[in-house]
Image (cartoon, rainbow, N blue to C red):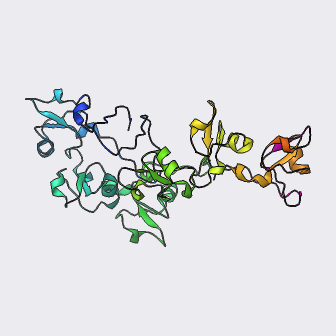
């Protein structure tokens, strides 16, 4: 989860302190974390109580004799090694699947031994899934909706327990306490048509070859993740600013690539602003003057289109077809 130590050779022997080398992580090439996929249950960190000593992972998982909570083999006696994610501490959470996400979402075939040999061909045994936490199973039209309402539990994990067209979603935060207040503002609502697959955000934004509207990496090929806010749809709405509201109200510096690198040092690239609606660009002394008088449109966004002494302002309520003023526009809200 830290993306701090790369191992480009793919060999665990290049990793320090007994760490292993893992492929297909969600780390960017520069070591930063990739954009998370919003609808997947988080993969938990390995709990210290799962570390046990043994001559092999299988032996450590079956004997459960010598814990090594630090994760270091120097805690083990007689030259034994320390192994993580054994089933010694929570056998009921171990389930078979092609991936951790599949095991955690289906919860169909337990493997309490922690051994992949107990799973069908093509599947492995994954631990610390939420499968044993049935108090987190709730109904909803989506994972986000189930997590925010927390009204209809479905402890069996079956959709049949849910009303209407709702389905049962596992590992919601409902069991952790009261659902989030509906009055808390949702600052950025990522558009479904902006999610695309790629090995990193730049790759997804450049190729735009495979949409993943659910936001889940499960829709992408192995080795790729699902990235939101790509410029694949609506690239002409991407503008630079210190905040989304700053970018949406100023509409000064476009960044059609969707990358912060195209913006000045003190700003970032924000997508799906209303800046692409050039029909709202009008000249005036200030925004109020432009919005109330609707003197002259300036669809390019340049003040050079305006009479002397006037500037071009975006997002006015003016209508370019007749120069009249429509009803006031709604408050800027990210789409």
Where on the picture, by quarter, is residue 104?
bottom left
Outermost residue, top side? 74
Return the residue found at the far left.
78
Report the front residue among 205 and 95: 205
The structure residue drawn at horizontal position 24% and vertical position 37%, both measured from the top left corner, is 11
Q: Position of residue 157 (x, y in %)?
A: 36, 63
In the rendered image, residue 165, in percent from the top left (x then y), is placed at 48, 71
Q: Main secondary structure of the magenta part?
A: loop
Q: Position of residue 54 (x, y in %)?
A: 12, 38
Q: Quadrant of residue 310?
A: top right
Frontmost residue, 275 versus 79? 275
Which residue does the image show at 27% across and 63% down from the upper left? 108
The vertical placement of 216 against 81, above or below, is below
Which portion, as a residue range, is magenta? 309-335
Quadrant, the N terminus: top left
Residue 232 as seen in the image, left or right of residue 218: right
Above or below: residue 188 compared with residue 119: above
Q: Is residue 207 left or right of residue 330?
A: left
Q: Could you say where residue 268 lies in the image, as x and y percent from the top left?
A: 61, 37
Q: Is residue 14 above or below residue 101?
A: above
- Residue 253 visible within the image: yes
- Is 81 in front, or is 244? 244
Foreground of the two, 175 or 98: 98
Looking at the rendered structure, the number of numbered marks drawn on it comes to 0
Look at 44% across and 69% down and name the residue there: 162
Q: Is residue 34 magenta?
A: no
């Amino acid at each position: 989860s830290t993306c701090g130590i790369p191992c480009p050779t793919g060999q665990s022997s290049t990793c320090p302190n007994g760490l292993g080398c893992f492929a297909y992580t969600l780390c960017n090439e520069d070591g930063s974390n990739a954009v998370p996929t919003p609808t997947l249950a988080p993969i938990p960190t390995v709990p210290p109580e799962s570390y046990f000593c043994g001559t092999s992972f299988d032996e450590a998982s079956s004997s459960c004799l010598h814990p090594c909570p630090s994760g270091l083999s120097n805690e083990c006696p007689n030259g034994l090694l320390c192994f993580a994610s054994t089933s010694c501490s929570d056998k009921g959470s171990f389930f078979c699947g092609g991936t951790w996400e599949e095991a955690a979402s289906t919860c169909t075939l337990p493997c309490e031994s922690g051994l992949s040999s107990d799973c069908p061909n093509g599947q492995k045994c994954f631990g610390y899934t939420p499968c044993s936490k049935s108090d987190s199973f709730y109904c909803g039209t989506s994972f986000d909706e189930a997590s925010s309402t927390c009204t209809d539990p479905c402890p069996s994990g079956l959709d049949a327990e849910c009303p209407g067209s709702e389905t049962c979603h596992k590992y919601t935060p409902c069991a952790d306490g009261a659902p989030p207040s509906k009055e808390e503002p949702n600052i950025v609502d990522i558009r479904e048509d902006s999610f695309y697959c790629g090995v990193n955000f730049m790759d997804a934004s450049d190729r735009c070859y495979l949409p993943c509207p659910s936001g889940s990496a499960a829709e992408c090929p192995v080795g790729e993740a699902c990235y939101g806010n790509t410029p694949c749809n609506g690239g002409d709405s991407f503008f630079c600013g210190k905040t989304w509201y700053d970018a949406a109200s100023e509409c000064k510096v476009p960044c059609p690539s969707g990358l912060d690198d195209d913006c000045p040092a003190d700003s970032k690239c924000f997508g799906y602003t209303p800046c692409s609606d050039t029909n709202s660009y009008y000249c005036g002394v200030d925004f109020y003057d432009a919005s109330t008088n609707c003197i002259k449109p300036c669809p390019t966004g340049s003040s050079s289109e305006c009479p002397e002494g006037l500037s071009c302002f975006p997002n006015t309520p003016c209508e370019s077809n007749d120069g009249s003023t429509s009803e006031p526009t709604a408050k800027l809200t990210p789409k």
